[in-house]
Amino acid sequence: MRRYPPGFLSLSASVACERFGFFLLTSLLLLYLNERLGFTTAQATDVLGCFIAATYVSPLLASAVTDGRFGIVRGTALGYIVAAAGYSLLVAESRPTMYAGLTLIALGAGAAKLAPQSLATRLFAAQPQLHDRGLTLIYLLANVSALVSPVIGETARAWFGWPAAFALASLSLVVASIIIQTQSHVLRSVEGKAGGSSDSGQAHGSGSLVMLLGLCVLAILFNLAQMQASSTLLLWTRDNTNRHLLGWELPVPYVASLHAGLVLAVSPLLARALLRLKIMPGLPTAAAKIALGMLATGLAYAPLVVAALLGHGGSLVGLGWLLGCLGLLSVGELLVGALGPSFVLRLAPPTRGGRWLGAWYGSTALGYWVAGRIGGLWDRVPHSLFFLGLAVLPLMGAAVSLCCHRWSTRL
């Protein structure tokens, strides 16, 4: 078994626990707002979009705390506890406590997002060849959490009610805090170390500025399409899809598990396909991979356009249409969501990498907010037209990515 630096496995386990609570919440939140608290569809999608957007803005606030004497490890442990308190407020099942709880969860998630990249980079300073493998392990554990948490959360909700599901999420954050504090002496000892080498010095002058701005636009278009897996696709599954399989009805929140499971299943197949693409001269550069990811994200909604036309008049459509959509969304997530931040750091000047990474996450937050607003159209426009719009926007992003790719090949 490959040996990782002391403290790394504890860091990975704490991230997995934090992601367990977060994905449990996102798989249930839209339905909780709509079915339990009486929010309209438009209001529920808007709240969901604002909440997820806030989790990408809050790291900017958390960094002001963790960069000082407080430190990353203490800030992360505190973030876990703050988020745990937020989940516990959701147990009250009222609108005021819901807003307060989501605010605390977003703040806690901000501190949690800083830990993996910052601490892993320092832990692997003496073994840079293992850095990417370490981050891959964290990514894998996060997706495993995304796979199992909706199933466990929905089971707890069905058997014991909504409070039980949120209590489980709160408990997972408490466990995350305990895990990271057991190795706090090891992790805090590496906080002062400089990070490993970065690719950010590979910027190409003024050309990279155009590409970075293009990537920020792309982040908006990508995430407004991807977020529908946690919002309108749940509504589509609930109201328009035949969910019966061999006499068993698929619970709606399990859609989030299907998405995560497809990410895990597609990942090795996609890696093998990309290795073959390298045989072609100049391919695949990061820009070309991202263009392919945007293309997959746009095409993901084509099956649902057809399904919405077939189901016009209220008839239910088969589950296969949804699986086709989620499969292509998984390809987009692996190519754009995973590669985007590293590509930004490669293009940015060495002294401005953090600023441009903040711009990427800010654009991501804007994309989620716009996605929530777009979700408000679900009950106002034909579903076929709604899905067609979601297909067109990422395809526009694919065009932007191709322009970036051509620009990079000329530099």
Image (cartoon, rainbow, N blue to C red):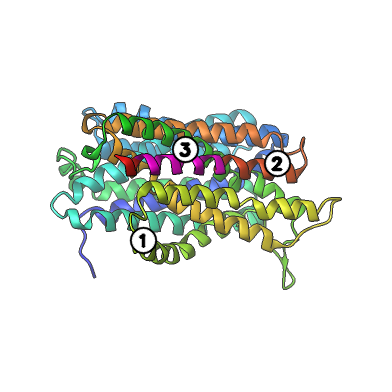
For label 1, the SS is loop
The residue segment tinted magenta is 395-407
User: Closer to the N terminus: mark 1 or mark 3?
Assistant: 3
Assess whether mark 1 and mark 2 are in contact (beta carbons under 8 angstroms): no
User: Closer to the N terminus: mark 2 or mark 3?
Assistant: 3
Disc 2 from disc 3: Cα separation: 20 Å
| Circle 1 crowding by C-alpha within 10 Å: few under 14, some 14–19, many from 20 | few
Which residue position holds label 1? 280
**Could one spot residue 112 in this view of the protein?**
no
At a point 46% along the width and 47% down the height, the residue shown is 291
At a point 32% along the width and 41% down the height, the residue shown is 410
Q: Amino acid at mark 3?
A: Ala
Where is residue 355 shown, x and y percent of the image? 31, 29
Which residue position holds label 3? 219
For label 2, the SS is helix
User: Closer to the N terminus: mark 2 or mark 1?
Assistant: 1
Quadrant location of residue 209?
A: top left
Tell me, for residue 386, which label it has, or none.
2
Q: Amino acid at mark 2?
A: Phe
Is residue 402 a member of the stretch shown in magenta? Answer: yes
Q: Amino acid at mark 1?
A: Met
